[in-house]
Image (cartoon, rainbow, N blue to C red):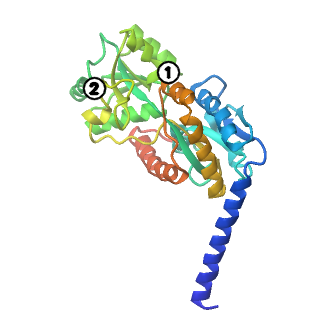
Amino acid sequence: MTQWNAVRQTSTLIATLALASQVFAQTFPTKPIRFVVGFPPGGATDQVTRAIAPKMGEFLGQPVLVENNGGASGMIASQLVARSAPDGHTILLNTTGGHLIRPFVDKSTTLDPLNDFTAITQLIESVFGIAANPVTGPKSLADMVDQAQRNPGKLAYGTAGLGTETHLLMETIGQVIKGPMQVVPYKGGGPAVNDLLGGQIPMVTQPVVTFLQHAKAGKLRIIAVILPKRWELLPDVPTVTEIIPGFVKPAGGAGVWGPAKIPPAIALKLQAAMAFAMKDPQVNEGLKAQGQIPVGSTPAEFTEDLKRSSQLFGQMVKAAGLKAE
């Protein structure tokens, strides 16, 4: 076989596979979509899924059934989806940070977050913020930087646990400003915010929704949001990068994955269904009220963002001195 014939046959095969994928997408889905959430009912991730599921079903012409399969910090759900048939009928919702960070901190993890899944879309970006006690905490982000630099390791902040996305973000900020801070890990964001209100700790880093009402009541001060640009619901609050330009944020919020090797046309159809759902005014406003920014990126965009973010999280885990256990 000549080189030219080999190239021509390869091109024909690629075109045939692409056409088959498109034909399959036209008939997809042929049964209800199983939308697996690795967390219990009622949480923020679960609420996002249930908000978009009805509209997704309307777009796809099949019901979208939300299934909570909690345990092992979302790993049980991830394993279930990774082992499912790659036909698009079983998909996973997980936090982007949780999906990417776990292999760096858990030696028992056997799943590859990049290669064992098909990236479908970054569904939403969660608004993380830094809140301070109005009496004992820093008055502004610039004040936080000043205090951390003048007294390395003294300024404390609360998070929902070691190795969480908020912990790694704050550790990285400390590295960039050359002013390490002291992490105070809690078993959840709620207890951390309670201690912030009580003055036991001067700062917390959490999704803004966990302390937004307290800030509106004047019980605490939001000194920054951890986003690429200012959040429309808090236009007067600066982003971290406005004061700390060397800080780079990985992808956050929540994303949707399927098992590896879902046909590209199927992945695009699922992404289109989610984008359709998030454009619904009621869904859109509901997500924003929960401190979520609708994204709806394409599979290609999400894949590239995950590659970049995985590298960043790996660097963050190393900088924080965490080791896989």
The reply to whether residue 307 is in sight is yes
Q: Nearer the viewer, residue 121 or 172?
A: 121
Judge the density around disc 2: few (<14), some (14-19), many (≥20) Cα neighbours within 10 Å.
many
Looking at the image, residue 320 sits to the left or right of residue 108; the answer is: left
What secondary structure is marked by label 2? helix
**Residue picked out by circle 1:** 189
Residue type at tag 1? Gly
The reply to whether residue 109 is in sight is no
What secondary structure is marked by label 1? helix
Tell me the quadrant of the picture where the N terminus can be found.
bottom right
Q: Nearer the viewer, residue 271 or 279?
A: 279
Give the quarter of the image for residue 178: top left
At 53% from the left edge and 49% from the top edge, which residue is drawn?
298
Which label number is shown at residue 141? 2
The spot of residue 267 in percent (x, y) is 62, 51
The spot of residue 2 in percent (x, y) is 60, 91
Looking at the image, residue 294 sits to the left or right of residue 181; the answer is: right
The spot of residue 299 in percent (x, y) is 55, 51
Which label number is shown at residue 73? none
Judge the density around disc 1: few (<14), some (14-19), many (≥20) Cα neighbours within 10 Å.
some
**How many numbered discs?**
2
Q: CA distance from mark 1 to mark 2?
A: 20 Å
Residue type at tag 2? Leu
Q: Is residue 274 above or below residue 281?
A: below
The spot of residue 6 in percent (x, y) is 62, 84
At 67% from the left edge and 43% from the top edge, which residue is drawn?
91
